[in-house]
Image (cartoon, helix red, strand yellow):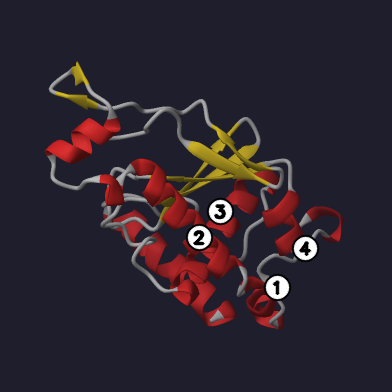
Amino acid sequence: MCGESANWMYTNSGIYNSPFDQGCSIDGMGASCAEVLGLLGFGAAYSPAVMRQKAADMYSASRDLLPDILSRPSCAALFSGLPGGESALNFLDSDSHLRLSWDPEHDASLWATTTDYNGTAFINFNSDPDGSFINDTALGNADTIVHEMLHAISFVYNVRPAGWSDNDGGDDPAARAAQVMNQQIVKSACF
């Protein structure tokens, strides 16, 4: 997997280099990401930096839809347990316990993943050229942002809507069932 020079993460202060650099290799031999992509026939249009920027742009277009979506009473109710009456948008835009990034995932079918590390949630939006996030609409990606925000808030504040599960990743039947339930919760309340 390529992480050319450094992966990027976004905070309310802007984009910075992440400590999660993945580097590139071919059969254990080091190579630059551009070399790997060139050997695969992708060229500069699919460089990690270009794809990260495309994912960040897709995020921004979807983020612009969120004030209207999150103001719907049924959608706002999903976030009603935030401490101090914090709004979902404030959490997304300025919470010190949330970091956003745009890097390739191990599975192109993933839109995004959310992980928890020492009380900080990390949402990564999949920048794989064949990835679902890169190739979806702004509205479809807004759905993904809301879904991942619910995971992040669950990790950081231990607040979740009824029926929500943070164990919705993977191929086992329970994870698949949780994914379907989580998607139904978001779609019925917000879309």
Q: Position of residue 50 (x, y in %)?
A: 39, 49
Distance from disc 1 to disc 3, alpha carbons, whole Å, reads 15 Å
Which residue is nearer to you in this view: 185 or 133?
Answer: 133
Q: Position of residue 21 (x, y in %)?
A: 42, 27
Considering only order in the chain, which callout, 3 or 2, is on the residue closer to the N terminus?
2
Distance from disc 2 to disc 3, alpha carbons, whole Å, reads 22 Å
Q: Position of residue 173 (x, y in %)?
A: 28, 57
Q: Is residue 70 left or right of residue 130?
A: right
Please say if 83 is above or below 137: above
Considering only order in the chain, which callout, 3 or 1, is on the residue closer to the N terminus?
1
Q: Is residue 37 left or right of residue 91?
A: left
Q: Are marks 4 and 3 in contact (CB under 8 Å)?
A: no
Distance from disc 2 to disc 4, alpha carbons, whole Å, reads 23 Å
Q: Which residue is painted at 50% across and 60% down in the image?
A: 57
Q: Amino acid at mark 2?
A: Asp
| In this view, the mark in front (4 or 3) | 4
Which residue is nearer to you in this view: 87 or 166?
Answer: 87
Q: Which residue is mark 1?
A: 77
Q: Is residue 145 left or right of residue 176?
A: right
Q: Is residue 83 visible?
A: yes
Please say if 93 is above or below 147: above
Q: Amino acid at mark 4?
A: Ser
Considering only order in the chain, which callout, 1 or 4, is on the residue closer to the N terminus?
1
Q: Is residue 120 left or right of residue 116?
A: right
Q: Which residue is mark 4?
A: 87
Which residue is nearer to you in this view: 151 or 108?
Answer: 108
| In this view, the mark in front (4 or 1) | 4
Q: Which residue is mark 2?
A: 57
- Quadrant, the N terminus: top left
| Residue that protrudes farthest toward the top in the picture | 29
